[in-house]
Amino acid sequence: MGTPRFLYRLAYLFGTTPWDSGIPPPELTRWVEGPTAVAPGNALDIGCGTGTNCMYLLEHKWKVTGVDFVPRALKAAKRKAPGATLLIGDVTRLGDLGVSGPFDLILDLGCFHSISDARRDAYVGEVAKVAAPGATFLLFAFGEKGPGGIVAPESEIRRRFSRDFEVAEVTPGAPFRKQTWYRLLRRPA
């Protein structure tokens, strides 16, 4: 097991999960409830953790699939979002988990930037396979080194995703953490 995986398992074991606020981020609520809301359909939460966003999407009439590799997190997600399909496994191997889509909305709240560089292209390929044409993909990543040195700068997001996704919007987050939200749209296959 790699160091980041071990650290995430420890974090959930000891309840030290600052990324899990228990409330959906405003960037997600904007696209679910705001004036330009995406119509409910099939949603995929990549790195779903304890299921906060799965629960929120279910409450807004979405059919939800969540994937995470931490058993303790998935156990909490099953209690919090019992109507979601929740799977334990590697998000760079969605097909092996039986995740096929197509998904109209894909959410990644900090998973991509935690994946090793060697597995990031596999992640992109798997997400592209399950995204419906025109799907909205909301991706949150550290643009500069975040905790533990994790990073996925805008140049990398554009390079890795440009074949399959259009970068429709880039929204900087809190300046002290160099967080960035991306809204990507799946190009026609």
Image (cartoon, rainbow, N blue to C red):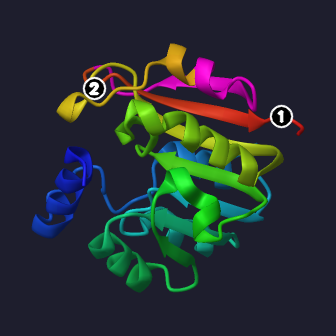
Residue, x 66% and y 54% (percent of image)?
A: 32
Residue 73: name its quadrant. Answer: bottom left
| Vertical placement of residue 135 versus 72, above or below | above
- Which residue type does callout 2 highlight? Arg
Residue, x 34% and y 63% (percent of image)?
A: 22
- In the image, farthest residue toward the right: 188
Q: Which residues are magenta?
A: 158-175
Magenta stretch: includes residue 36: no
Q: Residues within 10 Å of mark 2 (few under 14, many from 20)?
A: some
Return the x and y of residue 140 as percentages of the image width and height. 47, 37
- Residue occupied by mark 1: 187
| Vertical placement of residue 59 versus 82, above or below | above
Residue, x 65% and y 61% (percent of image)?
A: 95
Q: Which quadrant, please, contains the C terminus?
A: top right
Label total for image? 2
Magenta stretch: includes residue 166: yes
> In the depicted view, which residue is nearer to us: 115 or 22?
115
Is residue 145 left or right of 106 when viewed as pictured? Answer: left
Q: Is residue 33 visible?
A: no
